Image (cartoon, helix red, strand yellow):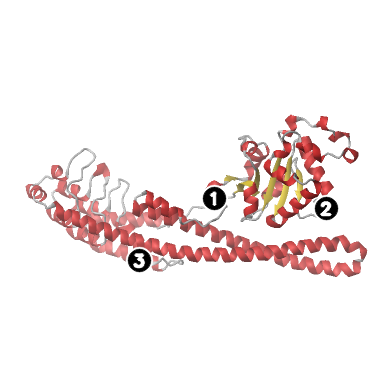
Amino acid sequence: MKRRNETRKKKFMEAAYDGNLQEMKFIIGDFEKELDGMEEKLDSGKRKQALLNLIDCKDSNNNSALSEASAGGSPEVCKFLLSNNADPNSKGAFGRTPLWRAAFAGHLNCVQILLENGGDPRMYSQDGQRVIDAATKDNVIDILKNWNIQLTERMLQQIDKSRREIKQEQINGLEERKKMAKLEYEQLKSKYEHVKNELYSCNCELQRLNDEYLLNPDMYGPLIDKKEAEKVVLISQSEDLREKSVKSRIFYKDLLSEIRKEKNKIKNETEESDDEGNDDSDNDNLDDNKIMKINIKEMDDLVLRDITNCVRTADKWPIIIDQNDQASTFLRYRDTNYVNCLDMKSMEKNKFRLALLGSIRYGKPFVLDLMQYDQELLESIKSVCDQIDDKLFEDMCSKELVKNEKYARLIRLESDGKEYEAHNFNQNRINNFKILFLTSNPYPSDKLLNLTFPIKVITRVKDDDFF
């Protein structure tokens, strides 16, 4: 696509300089057919903008097609381009406008057409030359001297209005697509949450059945098989909906970005534009611009070893968001105390307490894997913490647990053994302790995001080409 666009632009520029109007019309017609044949149909505004981008295309020296036609001395091509909203005052190489180049080359007819269509004789080139200074023929100098600048002002206002209307039509089309994309995103997210809840219930029921299996294998065996089959279907549905909803969210975010970009163009990045840009927010707490992003290879340095001190100096523990579950596998086989929060045995209060206390004692990361059930399992964690100590959950999340030896209240000397006596806790090891929340849910709950700071594991960077 990019190579085809470059070839089209080159041919268009050459035809403009040569005065080959038929070739230019053919190129535009061919481009229109290409737009019509696109799988994703362009709305009227974006189509007009795509055509205007071709009309205004520039070469490597920043000279526009109109500038080339002016230098080449083709009044017909100049008139055609201007009638299609070409910018009459675009600056090319050395800051020279189409009017400057036409005057320098002595093309009287081109100068006349450019003046009548908004070409501004007051503009300077980079070396400070006015258009009249560049003129090489007396008849060109005369028309420039006698030109009524008020006509230029009126034409510039009309041109500006026309180009703004095209841009606004494009923005309106993007706004409409944004509404539809947001609706689709919210519907997919809702379906995903519903299936996710069903899967959570299914897992809980499976654990209960497995625990009771030995009591009556003949009774519970078929029930387990049925539940396992149901789980497979739910997992498939969940993964499919998650992938679709993530793609929908990316598309929606891209539209927001494009709308802001186009508004900045039309309003020249004024304060008014900035204010309007803020209104485009999707009220998503997970703002991509405020997330620390890492790839899985950086997990060891940036999270476990924390070489940049971002985990240590933050006032909250991180939530690692990884929808591909790479982080879960990585952390499970590192020197961590890993807790599968869906596993009822791992969430038994004494086992949970010892895993947490051991992480503090030996300076290990305490990993709480919420999988895709962050909202439900966060409540499970709080419930277990409350059974151990009323303020444990709050102190865990706020990092207060390792201050002033507050962790000491977790020690049970009668059952924990001598290794957990208070004098065995070393501050250097305690400094290496950290709590890592982990989720594969691309949309963590607001409550979890408020308790943590997000780190997103990324696998690739997506680049989009727009016309």
Earlier sequence position, callout 2 versus callout 3 = 3
Discs 3, 1 touching: Cβ within 8 Å: no
For residue 277, side relative to residue 441 (left or right): left
Q: Is residue 20 visible?
A: no
**Residue 278: which disc?**
none
Disc 3 element: helix
Which residue position holds label 1? 288
- Counting from the top left corner in percent of width and height, residue 43 is at 40, 66
- The reply, left or right, for residue 323 in relation to residue 11 is right
Q: Which residue is mark 2?
A: 345
For label 2, count other residues whose C-alpha is less than 10 Å away and answer few (under 14), some (14-19) or many (20+).
Answer: few
Which amino acid type is shown beneath numbered disc 1?
A: Asp
Q: Quadrant of the N terminus?
A: bottom left
Furthest residue toward right = 215
Q: Position of residue 122 (x, y in %)?
A: 18, 46
Mark 3 sits on what residue? 32
Q: CA distance from mark 2 to mark 3?
A: 64 Å
Question: Which is in the foreground here, disc 2 or disc 3?
Answer: 2
Type of residue at label 3? Glu
Disc 3 from disc 1: Cα separation: 36 Å
Whichever of labels 3 and 1 marks the residue nearer the N terminus, that label is: 3
